[in-house]
Amino acid sequence: MTTNSEYMKIEKARRRNDRIRTVVTYVLLGFWALIVLFPFYWMLLTSVKSYSAYNGEYIPQFFTTSPTMENYTEAFTAVPLARYFTNTIIFTLSTTAIMLAVIVLAAFAFARLKFAGRDMTFGMFLSLMMIPNELVIITNFVTITNWGMRNTFWGLILPSVTSIFYIYLLKENFEQIPDELYKAAKVDGTSDFKYLWKVMIPICSPTIVTITILKIIECWNSYVWPRLITDKQEYFLVSNGIQTIRESGFGRENIPAMMAAVVVISIPLIILFLIFHKKIMAGVSRGGTKG
């Protein structure tokens, strides 16, 4: 039989082990955070170093005593960075809005409507996810070129207005809503569209918000397709702009100004993720839960 003193010793040992485990966990997480965040710190640090100070460093310095904002001014004056920003905002917002309309209606049809060949059609859609992106890009390039949409916003937007994965994710969420709600709504004379708008979308709003944020990030970082379908600066996105800056003499010679441009382009996504990271995690975990 365990005495009080023995019980207290066991309890103290357990608490000590818990504290050690907690300390080790936080140390490892802190070390990993340093590894992940260091490139961002180095990018920000380089962007506030003067051109002469950066070139005069034989050994890289991890801090600067004379930060400057001249690099940010030069990043906007040496290249049309403001135009790249505007183009990216137009492309991102338009693509995301059209995609949401497409995937919400498609997910609702596959989740709630009864029609011949529904499961087979959805299975065929899922099979498209196994096709390499390179093959899809080639097909899209030929189609957009034949339609005369190269160097247009529609040529940038149209190939990105749907996603099989997002349709699947939203369909799984719609199917978690009890059928009794749909049947009760139909008895009350509610149309399918009204039921979708008033019931299903509000219930599944965390997943829809997650999809919206992920799509915005995807569009903002899009590089291959915009690089392929546009060769005029008036349609360049920020990803194309950064590559153009890097390939030009400005980007190769003035590294601090180049880093300043990268910081400016990265800030919107960082702020977006910091604000909505909880909703992203909630939406993803909801999409992976069935029942």
Image (cartoon, rainbow, N blue to C red):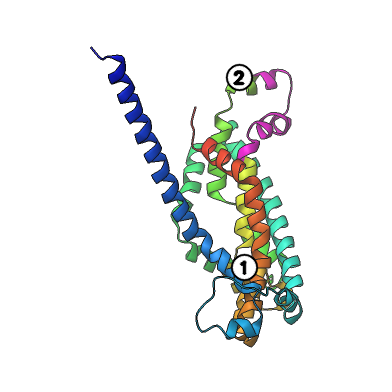
**Residue 205 or 247: which is nearer the viewer?**
247
99 or 265: nearer the viewer: 265
Residue at image mark 2? 180
Q: Sequence order check: which comes first, mark 2 or mark 1?
A: 1
* Gap between marks 2 and 1 measured at Cα: 54 Å
Please tell me which residue lies in front, 95 or 245.
245
Residue at 37 percent across and 40 percent down: it is 20
Placement of 236 over or under 211, stated as above or below: below
Q: Residue at position x 41%, y 50% from top?
A: 28
Is residue 3 in sight in this rendering? yes
Query: Is 191 a magenta residue?
Result: yes
Q: Tell me which corner region of the image, top left, top right, bottom left or bottom right, holds residue 73.
A: bottom right
Query: What's drawn in magenta, residue-wise?
Result: 184-207
The circle drawn on residue 117 is: none
Membership of 135 in magenta stretch: no
Q: As drawn, is 197 to the left or to the right of 167? A: right
Q: Residue at x 59, y 69 (%)?
A: 43
> Which residue does the numbered mark 1 point to in the structure image?
44
Count of marks overlaid on the render: 2
Residue 276, percent from left and from top: 64, 46
